[in-house]
Image (cartoon, coloured by chain):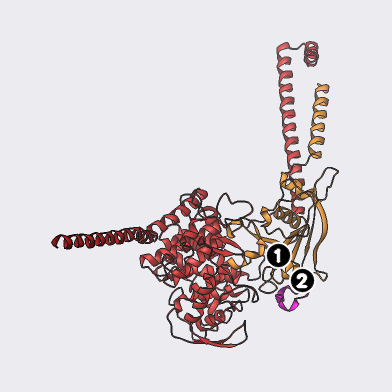
């Protein structure tokens, strides 16, 4: 009888140790909580979010946003940071996860609302399209180039560098002569 | 002598016959061309057929019994949903318009509750589109929902006449365009104290006409087809008016006095130059369905039939021929034909813009009022809206978890599961012990007062294990 009870006790102890050591998570949660868990075989991307152009257009900025907490004094909302890349991530997926991880406000519009079948980034850190004049909004580059594609249709690759940049002149002040897909839909606004 | 004359007569007759046959041949050859030109004119029925194909595709994707249900209904207040609601109402399809109006009312009331809230942000053009959608579905934008003080909301006044959100054009010229479309949707009475009058909206648009006759987002760039077509559509109610508008051009700085007709003529000429030889309209060097749809809307709103209007027929192809290129077999409409990766399926926006582009042409051919002239819209009573709203589930604000929340949830879940498993194990143990005790009791009773045999029975049990 004693043996039985001892055996049962050992089994319970083992189970308890096993369970408490295991984290029960969905895949989404896993990636969200392991973003900086870079291992040897991890794929990574580097991302930054900037709004320097607003500093040059302060007079056009929505008065309610004229504050350090919306527009940092150096224009950097998120400095260049490297995170784990989940296979199949699009530029949108990365931004979404990064903002949730860093608790940066982000609002986007679903794919049903534009002609490119892509999500559309309306605002980051409460800085929205048109917050700084009628030619302002968010654009993104990958490895220094504007993809000219919607962010949720652009698939990221290992070691890609993605930059989210706020423009106050429909792309012309941030080196994009040809309007990227993200800004082009402005004219379809209705 | 007689024979000579007869021969001469025969000769003349032969010649006459030859000439006649030649003429007949020429006429016969030309006639099919004339017949073809007539046959090339689209019938409203055929265009409505195109609309049906788009709707069938949209319907099949929704998987519900009505258009205005599920995700589409829950998306009220966003362009992707509003335009579908608008289109099916203009086509005359009776659907869940009352429920849609209920959802829109929630959106509008939320806007008034907290204009600077953390929630969704709406642009001015969103508000004007919402006004138009409300009317198309049968609602009244002058009395739509209640503000936090319990007063009836007047979107026309707050959004345009005495805008509480500032200059209608502060987010771009399309603000003026859609504000004008909203106030001209019906014969809305302009308040005497209105700041943004119809006249002011018209001159705000005209003063931004670019030097090439069109309209665009950047003064120094070429005009944009979609924007120019939207401006033309907004100005359509002023066609034929002799009223002269005086304003200072934002583009040239000059003072201009002109009628709307004069400005429109330049605008039509501008976009005519942007039509591709296949008939479609070109934006950024590519034919797009949206630009083509908007050009159709502009033309039809001005009473011009795209099948017959010479200014918009290139290489024998009309704008309708242009649009037909974009419809796939599944009925959907694609955005472009020259994309790097060919579109295997159309998208929602291309679809809804094609729907109202086609609607404009159908209405012209069928002798109905313009697409954005909502005087023929039905009426849905406030009671119907409330009733429909009662059976609708509440919309939960979908907020995705932040990193901290995910960690916390994980810990909570792990703790819960550990406790759960532990509880189950403990329960099993308890049951086992009870069974053991029961067995002991039974064995004691069987073996009687002989304590020893009771003991050995236990040992046997141990051995059994």
Q: Residue A25 appears in which quarter of the rendering?
A: top right
**Residue under numbered circle 2:** A53
Q: Which residues are magenta?
A: A54-65
Q: Dot 2: within a 10 Å radius of its alpha carbon, few (fewer than 14), some, or many (20 or more) residues?
A: some
Name the outermost residue toward the front.
B1
Quarter of the image with the C terminus of chain B is top right
- Viewer-closest of A106 and B13: B13
Q: Residue A167 appears in which quarter of the rendering?
A: bottom right
Question: Where is A83 relative to B161, above or below?
Answer: above
Question: Where is B29 relative to B426, above or below?
Answer: below
**Residue under numbered circle 1:** A138
**Residue under the point 83% across and 22% down:** A3
The chain holding disc 2 is A
Name the outermost residue toward the left.
B2
Residue A100: x %, y % from top left: 74, 56
What colour do you see for chain A?
orange
């Amino acid at each position: 009888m004693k043996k039985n009870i001892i055996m049962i006790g050992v089994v319970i102890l083992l189970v308890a140790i096993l369970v408490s050591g295991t984290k029960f998570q969905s895949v989404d949660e896993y990636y969200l909580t392991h973003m900086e868990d870079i291992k040897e075989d991890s794929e990574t991307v580097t991302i930054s979010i900037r709004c320097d152009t607003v500093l040059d257009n302060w007079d056009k900025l929505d008065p309610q946003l004229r504050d350090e907490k919306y527009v940092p004094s150096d224009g950097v909302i998120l400095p260049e940071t490297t995170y784990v890349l989940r296979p199949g991530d699009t530029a949108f997926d990365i931004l979404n996860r990064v903002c949730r991880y860093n608790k940066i406000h982000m609002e986007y519009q679903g794919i049903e609302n534009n002609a490119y079948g892509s999500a559309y980034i309306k605002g980051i850190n409460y800085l929205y399209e048109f917050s700084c004049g009628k030619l302002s909004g968010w654009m993104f580059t990958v490895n220094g180039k504007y993809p000219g594609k919607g962010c949720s249709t652009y698939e990221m690759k290992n070691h890609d560098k993605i930059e989210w940049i706020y423009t106050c002149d429909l792309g012309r002040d941030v080196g994009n002569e040809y309007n990227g897909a993200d800004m082009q839909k402005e004219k379809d606004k209705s | 002598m007689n024979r000579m004359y007869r021969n001469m007569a025969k000769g003349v007759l032969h010649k006459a016959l030859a000439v006649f046959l030649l003429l007949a041949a020429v006429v016969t050859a030309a006639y099919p061309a004339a017949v073809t030109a007539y046959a090339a004119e689209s019938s409203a029925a055929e265009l409505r057929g195109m609309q049906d194909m788009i709707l069938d595709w949209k319907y099949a994707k929704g998987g519900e019994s009505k258009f205005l249900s599920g995700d589409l209904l829950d998306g009220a207040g966003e362009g992707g949903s509003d335009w579908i609601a608008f289109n099916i109402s203009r086509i005359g399809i009776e659907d869940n318009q009352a429920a849609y109006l209920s959802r829109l009312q929630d959106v509008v009331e939320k806007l008034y509750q907290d204009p600077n809230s953390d929630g969704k942000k709406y642009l001015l053009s969103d508000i004007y589109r919402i006004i138009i959608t409300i009317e198309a579905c049968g609602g009244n934008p002058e009395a739509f929902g209640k503000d936090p003080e319990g007063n009836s909301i007047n979107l026309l006044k707050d959004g345009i006449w005495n805008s509480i959100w500032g200059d209608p054009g502060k987010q771009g010229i399309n603000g003026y365009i859609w504000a004008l479309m909203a106030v001209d949707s019906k014969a809305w009475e302009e308040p005497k104290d209105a700041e943004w009058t119809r006249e002011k909206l018209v001159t705000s648009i005209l003063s931004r006409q670019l030097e090439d006759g069109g309209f665009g987002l950047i003064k120094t760039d070429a005009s944009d087809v979609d924007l120019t077509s939207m401006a033309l559509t907004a100005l359509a109610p002023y066609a034929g008016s002799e009223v002269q508008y005086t304003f200072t051009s934002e583009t040239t700085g000059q003072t201009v006095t002109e009628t709307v007709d004069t400005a429109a003529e330049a605008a039509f000429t501008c976009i005519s130059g942007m039509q591709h030889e296949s008939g479609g309209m070109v934006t950024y060097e590519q034919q797009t369905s949206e630009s083509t749809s908007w050009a159709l809307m502009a033309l039809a709103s001005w009473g011009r039939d795209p099948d017959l209007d010479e200014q918009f027929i290139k290489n024998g192809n009309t704008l309708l021929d242009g649009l037909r290129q974009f419809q796939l077999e599944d009925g959907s409409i694609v955005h472009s034909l020259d994309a790097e990766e060919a579109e295997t399926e159309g998208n929602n926006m291309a679809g809804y813009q094609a729907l109202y582009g086609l609607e404009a042409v159908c209405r012209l051919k069928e002798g109905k009022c313009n697409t954005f002239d909502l005087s023929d819209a039905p009426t849905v009573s406030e009671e119907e809206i409330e009733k429909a709203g009662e059976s609708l589930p509440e919309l939960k604000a979908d907020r995705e978890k932040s990193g901290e929340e995910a960690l916390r949830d994980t810990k909570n879940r792990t703790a819960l599961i550990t406790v759960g498993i532990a509880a189950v194990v403990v329960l099993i143990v308890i049951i086992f012990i009870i069974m053991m005790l029961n067995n002991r009791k039974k064995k004691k009773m069987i073996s009687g007062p002989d304590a020893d045999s009771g003991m050995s029975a236990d040992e046997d049990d141990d051995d059994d294990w």
